[in-house]
Image (tube, rainbow, N blue to C red):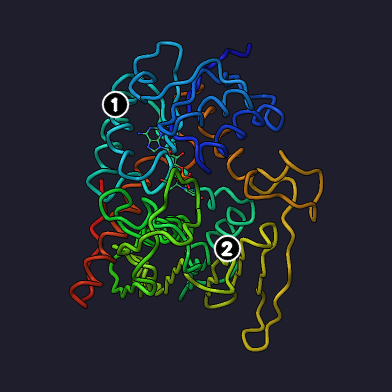
């Protein structure tokens, strides 16, 4: 028996569009889902943007103010895809109104915001899914299983990298992302949040860290009008970039493993160069987001000169089988969001959390906060395990 679930999207920029497309596609890939998402309403503050979204995707109504969504009894689940500074207010309000939420990372401006949303979700007894999409990649899940099985021995060290050029253009607009008040941190929240989640997903808790941050492009042009994603603002009046372009961080895991996490948003020549290298006493596993379904795996008893093989994940590994019939067929970024939608809707249907939750967002936010504090003090910082 398939029930309809009224869903809404708040903020129709890049992520709002991707969440909407995921709702539209999710039952194509997961016909067994007990819920059928029904696009009830889309809320946007930019005039015309919600109406365009409704015309394209078939939302039954539009709203200018997200509070209308909170008060709408037809809506039972909400995608919160607005800028970071709104996550706390909207997330708490939606949960308190009894709506399940699928909220984008990093969930607010810092650990206080993430905790407030997680507490509201727990208090209301609703589901709280979070957009840590990279852990949904079948190859990442396969890597986690491989590491947990002991096939690469005891993990000794890891490198996690998230390099991008999305902010590298000198005419890139001074959007909410570069302001403390609306974006919070810079590349920490934007990219390192994914890295912190991946680190924990693969290797468990981080115990301590030391970090360094830098702003490489200190001024950007103010946009003349509404922006979405990474717009340009050629010729606009210059304003200050308030948060970091770059972070490098040494990690000590609770397991004793060591790590390096590096993230940058202004790396010319790097397009979504996200990935990891995990090394163990008997092998290693390598992943690059741009070759999302491949793992480099070195295992055996060779130690020195031990070869690395390319393994293509296939049906039976993670959610690959919901998308392609055989290994070697490509999946894309948006498919990771379809997996996220599936896990969110399944959580709602069964009352059990599948996939990343607001509790995971708190863990990631605590790590990012420790990085920011370490970058300020220059010291190693202990990472308390959050509730
Ligand atoms: N998981 C990922 O890979 C990923 C990728 C990009 C962004 N994100 C996250 O998604 C969120 C949105 O990022 P984006 O790139 O889509 O940004 P964006 O700027 O493209 O979109 C944000 C949208 O929210 C709208 N908005 C602003 N204030 C609003 C309000 N009060 N009510 C309704 N709508 C409002 C804006 O007009 C805009 O259309 C951020 O938290 C970001 O960190 C996640």
Q: Which mark is residue 186?
A: none
Which residue carries the number 2 mark?
272
Which residue carries the number 1 mark?
93
Q: Residues within 10 Å of mark 1 (few under 14, many from 20)?
A: some
Residue 330 higher or lower than 275, as above or below: above
Q: Residue at point 67% right, 75% down? A: 300
Residue 381 higher or lower than 327, as above or below: below
Work out how far the residue at label 2 is from the one at label 1, CA to CA, in angstroms: 33 Å
Query: Which of the pair 139/365 is nearer the observer?
Result: 365
Name the N-terminal-most of marks 2 and 1.
Answer: 1
Q: Residue at point 55% right, 57% down? A: 144
Report helix, strand or loop for mark 1: helix
Which quadrant holds residue 342? top right
- x, y percent for residue 286: 61, 69
- x, y percent for residue 224: 42, 49
Q: Residue furthest left?
A: 377
């Amino acid at each position: 028996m398939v029930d309809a679930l009224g869903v809404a999207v708040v903020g129709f920029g890049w992520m709002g569009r991707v969440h909407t497309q995921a709702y539209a596609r999710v039952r194509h890939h997961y016909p067994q889902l007990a819920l059928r998402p029904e696009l009830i309403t889309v809320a946007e503050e930019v005039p015309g943007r919600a109406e365009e979204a409704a015309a394209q995707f078939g939302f039954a109504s539009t709203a200018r103010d997200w509070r209308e969504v909170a008060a709408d009894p037809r809506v039972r689940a909400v995608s919160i895809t607005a800028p970071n500074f709104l996550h706390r207010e909207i997330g708490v309000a939606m949960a308190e109104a009894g709506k399940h939420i699928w909220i984008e990372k990093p969930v607010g401006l810092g650990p206080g915001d993430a905790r407030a949303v997680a507490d509201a979700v727990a208090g209301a007894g609703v589901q709280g899914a979070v957009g840590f999409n990279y852990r949904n990649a079948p190859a990442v899940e396969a890597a986690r299983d491989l590491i947990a099985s002991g096939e690469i021995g005891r993990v000794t060290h890891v490198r996690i990298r998230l390099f991008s050029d999305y902010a590298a253009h000198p005419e890139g607009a001074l959007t909410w992302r570069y302001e403390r008040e609306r974006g919070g941190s810079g590349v920490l929240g934007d990219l390192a949040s994914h890295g912190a989640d991946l680190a924990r997903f693969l290797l468990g808790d981080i115990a301590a860290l030391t970090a360094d941050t830098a702003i490489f492009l200190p001024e950007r042009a103010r946009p003349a009008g509404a922006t979405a994603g990474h717009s340009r603002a050629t010729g606009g009046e210059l304003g200050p970039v308030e948060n970091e372009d770059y972070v490098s961080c040494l990690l000590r895991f609770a397991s004793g493993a060591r790590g390096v996490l590096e993230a940058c948003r202004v790396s010319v020549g790097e397009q979504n160069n996200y990935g990891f290298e995990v090394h163990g006493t008997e092998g290693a596993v390598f992943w690059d987001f741009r070759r999302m379904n491949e793992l480099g795996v070195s295992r055996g008893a060779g130690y020195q000169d031990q070869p690395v093989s390319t393994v293509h994940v296939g049906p039976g590994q993670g959610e690959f089988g919901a998308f392609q019939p055989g290994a070697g067929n490509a999946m894309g970024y948006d498919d990771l969001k379809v997996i996220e939608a599936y896990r969110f809707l399944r959580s709602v249907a069964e009352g059990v959390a599948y996939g990343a939750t607001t509790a995971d967002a708190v863990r990631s936010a605590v790590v990012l906060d420790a990085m920011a504090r370490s970058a300020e003090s220059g010291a190693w910082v202990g990472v308390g395990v959050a509730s």
